[in-house]
Image (cartoon, rainbow, N blue to C red):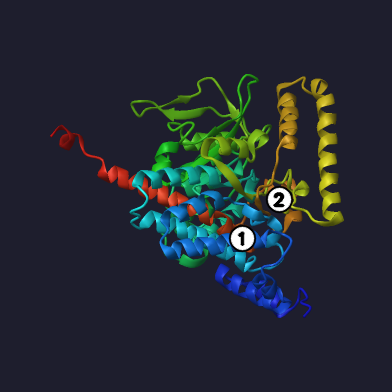
Amino acid sequence: MILTMASPVHRRLESADSYADWHAAAELYDARKGLDRWRAKDQTSLYDYVAVTRRLTRLRALKQAGNNKGLMHALNEGIHGNMDGIGKARLYTKARAGTKHLVEEYIREITDALAYLADNPTPDITEAEKIDFFQRATHCFGRTGLLLSGAGTLLFFHFGVLKALAEQNLLPSIISGSSGGAWVAAFVGTRTREQFLQDLNDPELAHREREPGELKWYEKLLGKTVSIEDGDAKLAALIPDLTFQEAYELSGIQINISISPTEHHQKPRLLSATTSPTAMIREAIMASSAVPGVFPPVALAARDENGERVEFLRGSRWLDGSLTGDLPVKRLARLYGVNHTIVSQTNPLVLPFVDANKDPSGIIGLARQNGLSLAKNISLATTRLWRRPLSTTDLGRTLVNGFISLASQSYTGDITILPRQRMAAYNPLVWLSEKSQSEVNALIDDGERSTWPAMERIRNQTMISRELDRIIAQYDRDVMHKKPSKKSSKK
């Protein structure tokens, strides 16, 4: 059956009010197109279905027989995000509602086996052996990071992405942001999940009576964006005056904010509870948002050993984080073992050159990718050739170095979420202008709807790492609970 864009199924996909509604429409779409049969059929050249079937059968047999040592041995060789090709992007571009049932069953079976070993007595495996196994498995499998690009006032798109993920309990605990993305990362990272969703749902769903003069969260963030005083007022209204460590203890989320240096001897930095626990979040956001030529460089702040506010990295000034670290993938890998990334990309400077599909197929896809790569290389070579004559002033040097940094970066992740209406975002007048309430709601809605098609891929590709994180966290709590107090140890 041929489905046109005006068909009832497409209209149902476009008009869905929630992910549950969208997924139900996606399943109907797959059924109408015969893609449900594609999902049910194991065979395809996209992955080694024979090996996956063999591993799945073995895991089930070992678990049913109570062979814990054998199960652990089988897991040791089979915990890998792209084992036998199951992580390929093209496995998720065929059907709307998910991928091959065999792939989904295999991932669930590994997750269930991990939970089984962690949560049940295993007389043939010592506690020390299990802890060692889970720590190694966590290290080898890696973790997922969510990266929010620089966005200007298009940052509300990021809110929609985070809202969609949080409602499905799929929000990663490692989030980075630069420029506009730094605002969003700090917003979610200084609140509990419940507080975050309550704030985001307030504009459309709550309609509660407010105190005189009280502003909703999105009203606090509206208005002109070229005033330093206005930016300070927005920060004070939106983001608690916390250090990175205090925010992590509150939310359990590792906020990472990119900033760029103004001095030649300084290097770009990624501020977080790991790298700079005493640094203050508000000043980090202002630095990461300081667009050259629009905002002056910003001095950072921190709390000293007495809890007093002091200057952080005294004498240094910092600028827009997207210039050098829009998506700090390598630094997240070093800090947290992140090897799987979800990117919410709204950076207007790079959107024309970004393709969400990292695995292009066919002649057209390959030609487009090669053309973009060639254009980037030519522009970089030309800019480097004219670097010295263009760098006669501090602003010129900053802009030239900024362009080279921008053009040298990668702007996609393993999973890249892009605005559906991308052409509107290319206009600088759009991404630097103030937004009305209806425009804010539209951007949040676009972020949600742009995330829904990737939801099952995100669920499958993060399921094992989320289970491993749960297990390690449980072991850590158990160790703290069993740890004797100083008073009892003296006895």
- Which mark, residue 457? none
Which quarter shows the C terminus?
Answer: top left
Q: Secondary structure at mark 1?
A: helix
Front position among marks 2 and 1: 1
For the residues marked 2 and 1, what is the alpha-carbon distance in whole angstroms? 48 Å
Q: Amino acid at mark 2?
A: Val
Residue nearest the observer in this picture, 316 or 453: 453
- Which mark, residue 52? 1
At 33% across and 47% down in the image, what residue appears?
477
How far from the left and from the top, in percent, is residue 75? 51, 53
Residue 153 in sight in this render: yes
Q: Is residue 81 above or below residue 24?
A: above
Q: Residues within 10 Å of mark 1 (few under 14, many from 20)?
A: many
Q: Earlier in the sequence, mark 2 or mark 1?
A: 1
Q: Amino acid at mark 1?
A: Val
User: Is residue 486 left or right of 333 when viewed as pictured?
Assistant: left
Residue 456 in sight in this render: no
Residue nearest the observer in this picture, 415 or 384: 415
At 53% across and 61% down in the image, what residue appears?
58
Which quarter shows the N terminus?
Answer: bottom right
How far from the left and from the top, in percent, is residue 37? 68, 75
At 85% across and 30% down in the image, what residue appears?
382
User: Is residue 159 left or right of 70 when viewed as pictured?
Assistant: right
Q: Secondary structure at mark 2?
A: helix
> Image quadrant of residue 107?
bottom right
Label 2 belongs to which residue? 430
Q: Residues within 10 Å of mark 2 (few under 14, many from 20)?
A: some
